[in-house]
Image: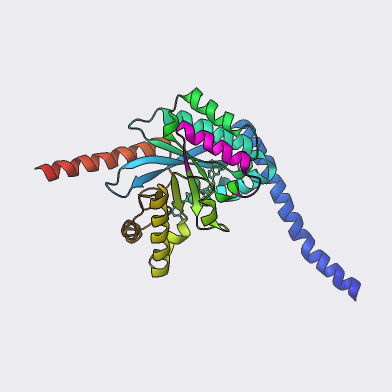
Amino acid sequence: RAKAAGRNVYSFHEPGLDAVIAKRSLLERDLRDAVRRGGFVLHYQPIVAVEGEAVGGFEALLRWQHPTRGAISPAEFIPLAEETGLIVALGEWAICEACHEAASWRDGLRVAVNVSAVQFQQPGLEQVILSALVASGLSPRRLELEITESVLMRDSDAAITCLHRLKALGVRIALDDFGTGFSSLSYLRRFPFDKIKIDRSFIRDIADPDTAAIVRAIVGIGARLGATVTAEGVETQEQLEQVRQEGCTEVQGFFYSRPVTALEALNFARAQRNRKVTFARLCAT
Ligand code: C2E
Ligand code: MG
Ligand code: MG
Ligand code: MG
């Protein structure tokens, strides 16, 4: 009986696990292939100032159009790219591509690029960023790096040194997904961030007074530290009003725009600017 039960358990688990592993290794193979052949594009999501609603820049976000499965979310392929080390090559491509794209933008528009903790564990990251800046001609002041606290977690002296050197050049450093990690507040002491991005889970629940109080407290901390505070994931007018009230300096989210192609993102920035000009003219007459 035990043997029979054992066999049942065996036959119940094995195909499921096999399927998961098979799917994963197929995806890994395709990912490797896409990195080699250049199967990715960047989309850009506008970052909008709360006061005046002008676009200050865009966050570059990787998009993978899989040959048979269609668009695959970064939530699925970024963790796999990190586990397999493919993020090093993929992330390098994203940095170069974003810098080259942004170099053609006018009005000082900035570009924000996400950098994974795995990329910081490699010694070459600083050189990759410097080369991308030099090759593209983009001013370091127009580049922003978004990192999560995992970059600062353990054995992070090299990462912190690298961040300081980039910051000294004028590159801005943002702490992404703030509030979701293990002990976010202590990471604010490890590095003088230029920007704190409040995770969208807080914005989703901001109608809740306790959540609003937390957002307000983060804004207060940001102000004291000399960091701007961005609300991520603003989807509705109500959320926009609320984050404005709590004092966030910038917002990003579907309310203004989803991540879109560079051309669409620039059109959005222009439309926002024209709106402002029209409004100023109306006020003047
Ligand atoms: P993230 O850096 O926190 O990027 C913000 C994510 O929130 C994006 O998801 C964006 O599409 C999504 N988002 C923005 N506004 C809203 C909203 O109003 N509502 C909702 N529901 N979502 C919103 P995406 O593009 O799927 O990227 C997921 C994550 O993948 C990013 O989170 C980032 O951690 C990672 N990632 C993306 N591109 C890169 C990259 O080039 N390099 C690295 N290392 N990671 C990247
Ligand atoms: Mg980000
Ligand atoms: Mg984020
Ligand atoms: Mg995230």
User: What residue is drawn where x is 35% and y is 33%?
Assistant: 108
Q: How is the protein colored in the picture?
A: rainbow
Depth check, front residue: 177 or 79: 177
Query: Is 44 displayed left or right of 131 in the figure?
Result: left
Residue 65 % position (x, y): 55, 41
**Number of dots carrying numbers:** 0
Q: Residue furthest left?
A: 285
Residue 157 % position (x, y): 62, 42
Q: Quick check: is 166 in the magenta stretch?
A: yes
Q: What's the magenta region?
A: 153-173
Q: Quick check: is 76 in the magenta stretch?
A: no
Above or below: residue 254 compared with residue 209: above
Residue 76 % position (x, y): 60, 50
**Is residue 8 visible from the viewing direction of this image?**
yes
Question: In the rendered view of the protein, which quadrant contains the C terminus?
Answer: top left
User: What residue is drawn where x is 69% and y is 43%?
Assistant: 84
- Magenta: main secondary structure equals helix
User: What residue is drawn where x is 68% and y is 46%?
Assistant: 83
Indicate the quadrant where residue 12 lies. bottom right
Question: In the rendered view of the protein, which quadrant contains the N terminus?
Answer: bottom right
Depth check, front residue: 36 or 5: 36
Q: Residue furthest bottom?
A: 1
**Is residue 73 visible from the viewing direction of this image?**
no
Residue 73 % position (x, y): 55, 48
Indicate the quadrant where residue 275 lies. top left
User: What residue is drawn where x is 67% and y is 40%?
Assistant: 85
